[in-house]
Image: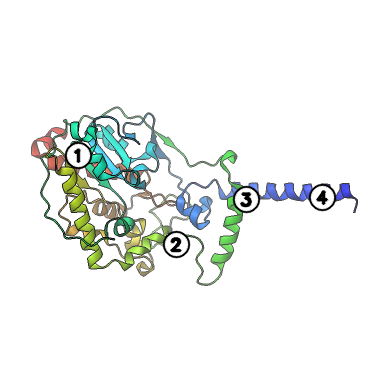
Amino acid sequence: MQPRTFSLSVVGSTLALVAAAWMLGWWLQPVYGDLTRLGGYAERHFGWNEPVLEFDPLPATFGEWRRQVDILVIGDSFANLRPAQQWQNHLAVRTGWSVHTVDVHRVDPDALIASPLFVEHPPRVVIWNVVERNLADDHATVARSCGAFGAGPPVVLPTPVVQPKSAHPVSRPVSLADVNPGFARIWLHRAVLRALPGRQAGDTVHVELARADLFSSREPAGLLVYEDDFRKTAWSDEHLRRIRCALVDIAMRFQANGRTTFISALAPDKSSAYRAWARDPAQLPPARLGTLLDALPVPDARLDLAIRDAVARGVADVYMPDDTHWSTAGHVLAAQVITDHLLRLHGPAATAEAM
């Protein structure tokens, strides 16, 4: 073969492979969810198809805390992942309360409490919003004696006033510009592995649901969950005790000024939220959040109960089908439940005014 012919054939073959990867990537659709990305699943099959709401401008603020606010949220990805979609915006719109969010992994609670802003202008409420699966790793690694919990001061928040909505619906990206051709290779490799008996590929676990009305994806009876959800299977009663003690300790530190009330709003894992509707619930880890919260002295919004009821009613996309996190339905529900919880702490008069 002549060198020119050989070079042209190599270039042609390369271009053909690249084009094939782009076409396969487009067929899979641009990757959006963490579970499709980690597990090598196609957005075409597991991506959400109902639009989600995003705010522009944001009613709530995120990042470094720089100004006085009514409510300070300290949370993980359930509070920070996609700021334009977060429940804090819905809460701010529903009430007119000022809400700011900081990342629990980037803040030292003691340093925050000692900061001039917290000392001089403490938030009226601190909300601890983290997910179930990380509670033991974050709060149960150290044995401690459990101090007594004292209720915080009465919640004093402005009378809720509904704000003009600034949310608009957005659809999952399907543009060629968002295609990741490298994901096509990952999808092919993991699809082959999943075809082998008893094999799992990546960090995503797939189980079948007994219902097909809980997600807007093309495969609504297929549930994707994060493999790390299974870590809570190993939790003992001692783990639960340590988590409760840690939350009591955190709450009392934030409430020590006598002006701030601390509440938790612990988010259930996706596996916990949908376990009752799995075709074989034993394929998923048992939910532990209910047992933890039933004996937790710190006031908690009980998102687990509200989400359980919403899923039982058939509310679609409480969690995104391709992701570990909430979709718009979940964010709206969280905002509603947390607002109602704060109004109950505020007292009967405030609740009546809000209605």
- Could you tell me residue 135's position as x and y percent? 29, 56
Q: Is residue 268 visible?
A: yes
**Location of mark 3 (residue):** 24
What's under tag 1, amino acid-wise? Val
Gap between marks 3 and 2 measured at Cα = 23 Å
First in residue order: circle 3 vs circle 4: 4
Report which residue position mark 2 lands on.
Answer: 205
User: Where is residue 303 shown, x and y percent of the image?
Assistant: 25, 50
What residue appears at the point 40 percent right and 52 percent down from the top-left corner? 324
Could you tell which of marks 4 and 1 lies nearer the N-terminus?
A: 4
Badge nearest the viewer, 3 or 4: 4
Residue under numbered circle 1? 125
The first of marks 1 and 2 along the sequence is 1
Disc 1 crowd, CA 10 A, few/some/many (<14, 14-19, 20+):
many
Most foreground residue, 106 or 184: 106
Q: Nearer the viewer, residue 67 or 37?
A: 67
Residue at 33% across / 56% down in the picture?
134
Q: Position of residue 37 (x, y in %)?
A: 50, 52
Q: Check disc 4 and give the amino acid type.
A: Ser
Label 1: state its secondary structure: strand
Tell me the residue at 36%/59% (across/down). 271
In the rendered image, residue 322, in percent from the top left (x then y), is placed at 45, 51
Q: Are marks 1 and 3 in contact (CB under 8 Å)?
A: no
Residue under circle 4?
Answer: 9
- Label 3 is placed on what type of residue? Leu
Mark 3 or mark 2, earlier in chain: 3
Cα separation, mark 4 vs mark 2, equals 42 Å
Examine the rendered structure and indicate whether residue 302 appears above or below residue 232: above
What is the quadrant of the N terminus in the image?
bottom right
